Image (cartoon, coloured by chain):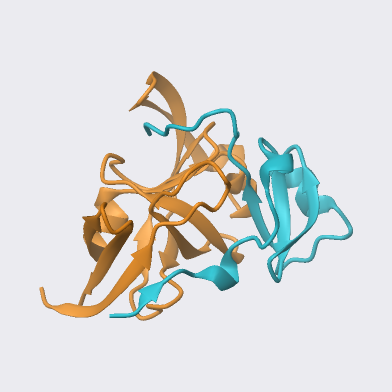
Chain colours: A cyan, B orange
Amino acid sequence: MPVLDQAHLAPLEDTRPYAGKWIAIRAGHIIASADDSVSLQKNPDVRSDDQLIPVPSSDTSIYVL
Amino acid sequence: MTAAASLTVAYRDLFKTGSRPYLYLWVTGVNGRSGAIPGLVDSGADQVSLPDGFAPLMGYADGDLDEIDGTGADGSATWRRARQASSAYVPEMPAHVFSFVPIFTPGDTALWGRQDFFATFAVSFDEPAQRFDLTAWA
């Protein structure tokens, strides 16, 4: 069975500079960021079909969710 | 139930915080807006939970959400649960759409939980190989 990686959906760029923020991704590239999702959505550079996601805080290396 | 489709998904280090069982789902909110959301496949989560910021993007106003008491790994908390369901599917398995009533939390990671995601897919983890198998149930 082939192993799926969904690479076409993932950010191509390093997201660490945006830890704790929301980013807009288009074709794998980060095109805008903001402190919250609503502000990001209102950014005129952001299109309705861009992927909007939060970038997890990078100050933890172990997840217990 | 019978197995309808299967996928093997590699763990990934999406945010340079460690390799984990991330999976993108294509999520459609109550406003009809759709988008890909990365989340962790998490058998410890009772149901799908999403970071708070997704609520307005998916068309949920404050009045569409009820406060609930929950328990996370770091203790008890007050979260918000939607009154109306959204839907989602794995992009590579579009025939298997499932509904879920999202819980919105202050966290920064989406969790694909048992009562909705795991009720749609059988999940088998292979930690040494850093991958997991998904099997959709028809």
Q: Residue at x 28, y 59 (%)?
A: B129
> Can you say which quadrant of the picture contains the N terminus of chain B?
bottom left
- Residue B96 lies, with reference to residue A35, above or below; the image says below
- Residue B71, given in percent of the width and then of the height, sits at 33, 25
- Residue B101, given in percent of the width and then of the height, sits at 39, 50
Q: Quadrant of residue B69?
A: top left
* Residue B32 visible somewhere in the drawing: no
Who is closer to the viewer here, A26 or B62?
A: A26
Q: Residue at x 85, y 53 (%)?
A: A43
Image side of residue B65 versus residue B56, left or right: left
Image side of residue B31 versus residue B99, left or right: right
Q: Residue furthest front?
A: B128
Image side of residue B115 versus residue B38, left or right: left
- Residue A15, given in percent of the width and then of the height, sits at 68, 48
> Can you say which quadrant of the picture contains the C terminus of chain B?
bottom left
- Residue A41, given in percent of the width and then of the height, sits at 77, 53
- Residue B42 lies, with reference to residue B6, above or below; the image says above
Q: How many numbered badges does the structure rendering display?
A: 0
* Residue B122 visible somewhere in the drawing: yes
Q: Residue furthest left?
A: B1
Who is closer to the viewer here, B4 or A20?
A: A20
Q: Residue at x 43, y 65 (%)?
A: B88
- Residue B31 lies, with reference to residue B18, above or below; the image says below
Q: Residue furthest right?
A: A44
Image side of residue B92 versus residue B36, left or right: left
